[in-house]
Image: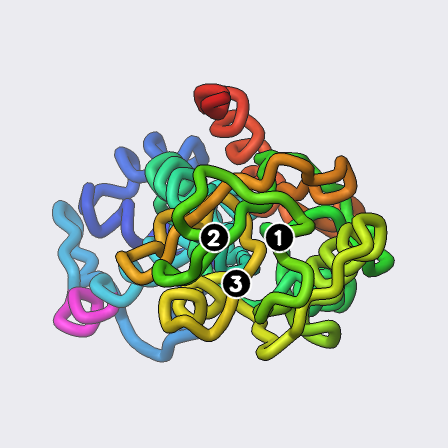
Amino acid sequence: MDLRQLQQFVVLSETLNFHRAAERLHMAQPPLSTAIRKLEDELGIVLFDRKPRSLSLTVAGAAMLKHARRTLSNVDELQRCAREYVSGDQGRIVVGFSNTASNAVLPRILHSFQARYPRVELVLHESTTHELVSELAAHTVDVALLRTPLFDACDAELIDLEQDHFILAVPADHPLAQQSCARLADLDGQRFIAFSREKVPAMHAIISLAFGEAGVTPKVVQQIVQVPTAIALAESGIGMALVPSAAARYLRTGARLLPVVDLPASLRIGIALGYDALTASAATLRFVENTRAVHAAAPPPAA
């Protein structure tokens, strides 16, 4: 039994006429009759009641017709799905992101992509940039929004999406909170909330480098992984923290955010989309293409 036999059976069931069914199937009548006989032999049942001037489905034939139509429909769906996977209109993408990236650029990227490709399943995976670089290499995530600069070896293609800079989160009752801006020297000897060397090595390294160049030695009282944690600890009076300016959305009332006027160029940070161009699926490439388009259409950041 093959799909063509099922199609022939369905068409003959609809026309109940060998001549008209053969015309619809673009074949001669004798081969059609032979194919139906063969199908009946394979199934071990009679599908049609043949009379000199009429043709009708048997009870068994009517029951088989439902299954034949369902089978052909499933095959059509299978073929459609295959075409969509090849084209990127259907599939599954694991999207990795770090905490601040999720708030800064992820919402507009996801909204646009899901509107254009509703049949692509997006699986969101939150982690740190340090871990996401390894997960990209291991292909456990397909794309990842990463904090830059990267201090880990990374073979992924990177698309720069956003440039950012550090600002200083200061407890509201600290004397520095009364100023309109800060300098790196203001942090010397102060209680400081640092990014973890193990979990967030890039952020830790560039801030430490800037302190070293400025001859500043804050008193590290806590190491954290996520930016919202740094803001919360500053609001609690634990200490000060350098955080990306995008973190302003996390601020409530217990801290002030101050620009740091003498930040070195090494403290420029950003967000990039990383993916493996050599192994990317069609759906992943659609995601990358859509992200480029969303980024190109975004208004420039305020000065």
Mark 3 or 1 closer to N-term?
1
Question: Label 3 to label 2, Cα distance in Å?
Answer: 10 Å
Specify start and end residues of the magenta stretch as a single range: 58-64
Which residue is denoted by mark 3 in the rendering?
240
Marks 3 and 2: CB-CB under 8 Å? yes
**For residue 222, which quarter of the picture?**
bottom right
Main secondary-structure element of the magenta-colored stretch: helix
Question: Label 3 to label 1, Cα distance in Å?
Answer: 11 Å
| Three-letter amino acid code of the residue under disc 1 | Asp
**For residue 189, which quarter of the picture?**
bottom right
- Labels 3, 2: front one: 2
Q: Residue at x 35, y 59 (%)?
A: 172
| Three-letter amino acid code of the residue under disc 3 | Met
**In the rendered view, does 301 fall on the left or right side of 143?**
left
Residue 174 visible within the image: yes
Alpha-carbon neighbours of circle 2 within 10 Å: few (<14), some, or many (≥20)? some
Q: Is residue 199 above or below residue 297?
A: below
**In the rendered view, does 242 fall on the left or right side of 216?**
left
Which residue is denoted by mark 2 in the rendering?
176
Residue 139 visible within the image: no
